[in-house]
Amino acid sequence: MELRWGLMADSFGLLLKGAILTLELTAVAVAMGIVIGLFMSLMRLSNVKILRGIAIAYIDFFRGTPLLVQIYMVYFAIPQLLQFQTPNNYQFIAGILALGLNSGAYVAEIFRAGIQSIDRGQTEAARSLGMTQAQAMRHVILPQAVKRVIPPLGNEFIALLKDSSLVSIIALQDLMYTGKLIVSRTLQPFVIYFEVALFYLAMTLILSRLVNYSERRLGVSDKR
Amino acid sequence: MISVKNLHKNFGKLEVLRGIDCHIKEKEVVVIIGPSGSGKSTFLRCLNKLEDINAGEIIIDGIPLNSETNVNAIRREVGMVFQRFNLFPHKTALQNITLAPEVVRKTSKAEAEKIAMELLKKVGLEDKAHEYPDRLSGGQQQRVAIARALAMRPKIMLFDEPTSALDPEMVGEVLGVMKDLAREGMTMVVVTHEMGFAREVGDRVIFMDEGKIMEEGTPEQLFNNPQNPRTQAFLSKVL
């Protein structure tokens, strides 16, 4: 069968809609990942054994099992376990939940590395001035750590944007799912998947430029 | 002011401090000298519990140094200056000084800045208030670090080799600030290799080696007429 390149223009609108859903999904999951990651990294570094244990178990589980399995767990297994009737938009909730929980584990390790990269002398100076551990963390360590984690955090978000294509498996109408749908109707896999790939590429390129820009902006007071 | 009894400290199996007894009076300037690895920095760091101690007792200004609440109370009263300055790189000189008064003492921003400017003037750096640490020389950074410690209005100041990381031409400006402090009656404990400073400013000099106080006395006694052979050997190398 010949390649019908004209389909690229015809499917642009539909794929754009899918791409917007992909972006929304990733943005919410990223926000969730940052909140979870911050708490998990602080727990991971805590002196309290139980908190540390919970954080280690969480991080190990979500980094050590496939995202696809996690999506299935949230979408199919959790409703069975908790015996609840899934609402109509449960695909969307399950997709965000799975991506956010997964991302939280990776972000936790990024934050932990960032916090640990700050010189011990900084904590000692803050503590010697009478600050509590929490005050030192909030006013001295975290502001410096945030700058250092921006590049790896950016990479994590780009990875998450790409991994979000896995949610197409639970019929969530993201960019990938929309592409599959169009292919099944037109039988033009090359043209359509090529266009889908271009969409993902455009999004990741924009995202990586944004990361570079914010990295430069935040580097003002820290030129070393 | 500071009372230390039978202080022991180990790093794993290594005994760093092996029974230190020491009393420091108000307004006294005590200079601790000794070879590297003698435990002098560790001793200083024990005084505001940057190191946990294994045995013994430390009482500062009547407060025993044990529980976490005591530690924070004591750290507010005890200022510390580090060999490597440890200024906060994301804050200007002024913000470095105002942070702890605002966060710990809940001083208003305006009041904290007023105090900070006075202190910067005292260390001769009021024109550098809005510079970030990486724009300052080592000597300037250390003077800001001293001002930062003073902003908490400490009763005692601890100096951990404050001039060891400085280029030679900057040592003088930092020692100058420390001399002013001593003259104003600050209680000070100084670990240093600057024998000239010890001789000129110290009320008492302590010689430490192998985790113990080997000898102590006035600068004249210790530098001119050391009794302990180890002190004699050390001084013959550094003087």
Image (cartoon, rainbow, N blue to C red):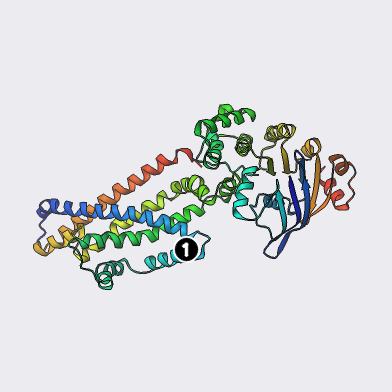
Looking at the picture, tell me which residue is in the foreground, B167 or B158. B158
Looking at the picture, tell me which residue is in the foreground, A67 or B180. B180
Residue tagged 1:
A51
Looking at the image, the residue that sits furthest to the front is B62
Looking at the picture, tell me which residue is in the foreground, A58 or B60. B60
| Residue at 87%, 49% in the rendered image | B232
Secondary structure under the numbered disc 1 in the rendered image = helix
* Chain ID, mark 1: A
| Residue at 24%, 60% in the rendered image | A93
Q: Residue B77 in the image: state x and y as whole percent.
A: 64, 43
Q: Residue A151 in the image: state x and y as whole percent.
A: 40, 50
- Residue A58 picture quarter: bottom left
Q: Residue B50 in the image: state x and y as whole percent.
A: 63, 52
Left of A182 or right of it: where is A56? Answer: right
Looking at the image, is B70 positioned above or below residue B220?
A: below
Q: Amino acid at mark 1?
A: Leu
